[in-house]
Image: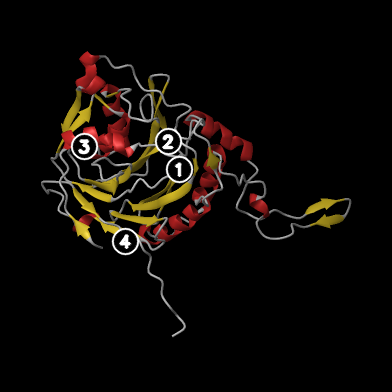
Amino acid sequence: MKQKAIFHAISSAIVAASLLFTPIATEACTSFIIKSSDNGYVYGRTLEFGIDIQSEPIAIPRNLHYQGTGVNGQPGKSWNTKYAAIGMNGIGLPILVDGMNEKGMTGGMLYAPNTAKFQEVSPAESKESVASYEILTYALTNFATVDEVKEGFKTLKVNQTGHAPFTGAIPLHMTLHDAQGKSIVIEYNDGKLFIYDNPTGVMTNDPNFAYQLANIGLYANLSPKEANPLMINGATYAPPSSGSGLHGIPGDFLSPSRFVRAVMYSSSASTQLKATDQVAVAFHILNNFDIPPGAIQLSSKNPYGGGTDGFERTEWSSVADAKNLVYYVRTYENSNIQMLDMKKLDLDAKQIRTFTLQDREVRFEINK
């Protein structure tokens, strides 16, 4: 993979961060985890946007100084990274949209415009706050477990600093999973912090996470096991094909429907495979959430529209092997899987490293 080392000055990145969220048609992401037989897990997610946000893999080293974004242009919370982290950014900026740290904690930010509302932060509290798009970077570079995140986010403020075309903060919520397989969801609703334990390991978009968990019960009849034939007055009515156990699973692209599908697919996946083998399983599950361009068309007035007319597509899908610290990416332009091995990186480097993804897939001719 062609690589380039680029240092991003954090102060200038704060000004440039507005470019990351230029008008976008929408985001409708799906994420999940699968446990492995060697006491590990893999984390998978899709990212959907209406325009190409030009995500690139980046590696954030230990002991790098970050300056968060505060209120009304003031400086926000500053910190030195305790843990190195890798993952996908946007528009070349030094913030993680999705990623994994050296302790095997993984996670991502997903769009939630109908529910996300962050805290009212006064100018006096600005230096204890960050902007919403900085929360994943803050979590992965400061904490090793979700229990540590729970404690750390109790004192962190997330302000409502906005960037065009949005009139307020970028409406996001966050999913995190640690090396022990514990999962949490962090949301800010009505200006209040909510941290949920997540037994499913799944997250999508709106509504809030409490609703998503309650909604699973509507599909309690679903099972990966085949249904027995129906008997009525001595007559037998067998299912027409295999797949009867999951008959009725929601197949549309609504967030609650994707949530139910992700729960069923990830919970029914075999746990008798090593993490390296579960990577392939995760990518096959992700195939079920790949949105064909044109299937979801939004106007600029839709809260998921981002201020412009357009349609969604799955820009990229990622899988993180938390046991072996390898991060995999497949893009819209290139279905070949590209990988970044954290164990082969200098985690004490002095600057952020950016990697260039191959944008054209390799197609092998077999009729020679």
In this rendering, would 96 be left or right of 52?
Answer: left
Residue denoted by label 1: 29
Residue 13: assigned label: 3
Name the amino acid, label 4.
Gln
Residue 104 in view in this figure: no
Tell me how far mark 1 sits from mark 3, CA to CA: 25 Å
Residue at x 40% of width, y 23% of height: 117
Asked which secondary structure carries label 2, the reply is strand
Residue denoted by label 4: 358
Residue furthest bottom in the image? 368
In this rendering, would 254 be left or right of 93?
Answer: right
Of the numbered discs 1 and 2, the one sitting upstream in the chain is 1
Name the amino acid, label 1.
Cys
Local packing at callout 1 (Cα closer than 10 Å; few below 14, some 14-19, many 20+) is many
Q: Quadrant of the N terminus?
A: bottom left
Residue at x 60% of width, y 35% of height: 217
Of the numbered discs 2 and 3, the one sitting upstream in the chain is 3
Name the amino acid, label 3.
Ala
Looking at the image, do the residues carrying marks 4 and 3 touch, with CB atoms under 8 Å apart? no
Residue 63 location (% of width, % of height): 13, 40
Local packing at callout 3 (Cα closer than 10 Å; few below 14, some 14-19, many 20+) is some
